[in-house]
Image (cartoon, rainbow, N blue to C red):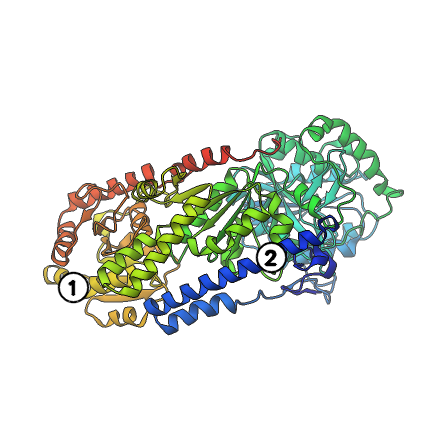
Amino acid sequence: MTAQDGAPGGDDAPDREDGPAALPAATGPLGWARRQLEYLRFRVLENAALARRGMHSLRNRGLLPTWRIVRGRVFARRLAPHRLELYPGLDPAADLHLPRADAPRASIVVPVHNQLALTLHCLHAIARSGDHAAFEVLLVDDASTDDTPSRLSRVAGLRYFRTPDNLGFIAACNLGAAQARGEVLVFLNNDTIVQPRWLDGLLATFDRFPDTGLAGSKLVYPDGRLQEAGGIVYADGQPANYGRFQDPLDPRFNFVRQADYCSGAALAIPRALFEALDGFDVHFSPAYFEDTDLAMRVRARGLKVRYQPGSVVVHLEGATSGTDPRRGIKAYQASNMLKFRERWQAVLRKVHPAPDLLDLHGLAADLAARHRYRRHVLVMDSYTPTPDRDSGSVRMVELLGLLVGADCGVVFMSQALVHDGRYTSDLQQRGVEVWWRPWIRGLAGWLHRHGGRFDAIVVSRHYVLSPILPMLRALAPEAKIVFDTVDLHFLREDREAERSGDPAARRTAARTRASELSLVRAVDTTWVVSSVEQDLLRELVPGADVRIVSNIHSAGDSPPGFDARRDLVFVGSYRHPPNVDAARWMVTDILPRVREQLPGTELHLVGADATPSVLALANHPGVRFLGHVPELEPLLDRCLASVAPLRFGAGIKGKINQSLARGLPVVATSCAVEGMFLRDGEDVLVADDAQSFANAIVRLARDRALWERLQGAGLDNTRRHFSPDSARNVLLPWLQGLRLRGRVA
């Protein structure tokens, strides 16, 4: 069965709708008319802003680079269909070999009672999953009476255990866990078909989020419908499978999220924690609610329960226990719910949501699935962050991560509302809920449905915020609006216009200045990246709440020393005019002067979206144009110095942060180090004309003591001013000023 991406499942795709039929009935025609007016206003303002940006890009970048940008935004690629691997032609009699690692990271425990064909299918899928993690498979045969003992006891690589009597699901799981050797226990039903790389995805949850105590897979039916995207437990003790029967590609079900519980059909827990908790509680024997109770006990230890969409498992629900709640083992479901409610009633009443039986549009279920987040923040930017391509994206990704780490439910949208492949998937794996077309056709309709959920809305760049600010105020009236400047665009454009003397550039800068200052006056809070910009805005807009949320980098621990290095590196996105100017100046005026004194010195030009004029620089002696380099660290670790010869610009320069954080000394202009707390001769070397710049590079190359002093000071600068802790110290007080939702336990 194939679930087509971009083809949401009919009535179960609640956020495709932008027409009146999609609104709750209570909104009425006035609500619909209000939304349409806001949407029309937004489209007019947005189109005008896009036209201005397009003309600016044509002047600065030329036709071909501008067309590439437009093509990437307007004609965004669609995701490939997600195909389930069900192995329909699998021969159960085929040879089966399972890996048996000497030091497994994971121990997969599969309890079985009869159902040999299902078990063989399950084991074949595990063997073919292609996971990189070392694992072992332990099969606990709970006194099967079919051919299970004779067939499975001979499977190569399988650790097979058999109980003399039928002990039940819980006891079988605990028995298997007691024999496990892996760091992480993974409990897997035998009526499952794991999908490729399911185990790697599940284990990644513990690596990305060290406070995870339990993680569960995305469960889907064989027909491609979603079975469970994490579980909800309501205040009355009733559990619910979030997303049941809906499209598994829906954005709501595709980001790592805190959950109340995860189904025991496919869940992982550190073995040491499982042992400390004495395993699944036999109070719920033989089965049902043991997984829900385990999740509650994990959380009582101060750890989190997380749903992992990157681990997909097909679950043949009911294949082993049936579906009739009045018969067989299924009958224990009702009685065990009473036991569960009695044990946890105080916590359930305090922190769990009440069920909403009239939740016709699924909004109450969406909120219930996210009730563990203390605050909800919507973040919007012009594009999905690409941290391996530009420094602004590094900052945005780190900001989103800090918000997630502060127990915020974080939603991200790019202005183009597209899925940007691995960049979008990376955000989802960081715990960010990302939306894209066709799941959201227009911002107005989506905000009409979801706007009341947000405590804050952060919008980066003036040209993104300007057209939508009235809509945000109207459709998300409780949210505090933050204008994230990224850098003050008008300041950079003013300096560029002053340098070029271009009247059109002066007019552009004036319009940008008016737009940015108007937004500073209109929003609740403005974020800038440097004290220089903060002081300027406080002077121009007295009384405005302006806070510094700068670049965010983690300093390296033991970078290579002086002897292991040579050559120079310049890093920058060539969509950015100051970088194009800097690269030309460096190659034509500075590098030849350096090579006169240091023959053989080479300059590595790094960066995406190079213009023809930048590409032509590779023809100069000593220049190597590398273009986009996804993994920049190895290059930084072998270069002698990073150069930042910027002659105009604004904000904090990520290229400098990135180099200093990696232990690479920097030679830069005064403009480049503006607002970065850097001292000439102590933290960096600063020069503003070509000869002085070249001399500074030569001095650094010949003075080992100076180089080592700058390396240490640069690392210290990163830790003091640009570390995650520095940003957290700004964000946490801001978050504390927002509306606080119910405290969770």
Q: Quadrant of the C terminus?
A: top right
Mark 2 — residue?
37
Q: Position of residue 474 (x, y in %)?
A: 58, 48
Residue 358 position within the rendered picture, expressed as x and y whole percent measured from the top left: 78, 44
Number of marks present in the image shown: 2
Residue toward you, 736 or 44: 44
Which of the 4 quarters of the picture holds residue 186? Answer: top right
Q: Measuring from the top left, give residue 596's x and y in whole percent.
A: 10, 62
Residue 325 visible at all: yes
Q: Quadrant of residue 692?
A: bottom left
Residue 232 in the image: x percent, y percent? 70, 41
As helix, strand or loop, the secondary structure at mark 1 comes to: helix
Question: Label 1: how many residues lie within 10 Å, few (<14), some (14-19) or many (20+)?
Answer: some
Q: Nearer the viewer, residue 675 or 518?
A: 518
Q: Nearer the viewer, residue 146 or 515?
A: 515
Question: Who comes first in sequence, dot 1 or dot 2?
Answer: 2
CA separation in Å, label 1 and label 2: 55 Å
Residue at x 54%, y 67% (from the top left corner): 77
- Residue nearest the observer in this picture, 339 or 165: 339
State the residue at coordinates (35%, 45%): 529
The image quadrant that residue 17 belongs to is bottom right
Label 2 sits on a secondary structure element that is: helix
Q: Furthest residue to the top?
A: 346
Q: Is residue 347 left or right of residue 570?
A: right
The dot on residue 589 is 1
Which residue is painted at 30% across and 54% down in the image?
492
Q: Give the amino acid type for the residue marked by disc 1 in the picture.
A: Asp
Q: Does the image show residue 187?
A: no
Q: Residue furthest toward the right?
A: 326
Which amino acid is tagged 2?
Answer: Leu
In the rendered image, the quadrant that contains the N terminus is: bottom right
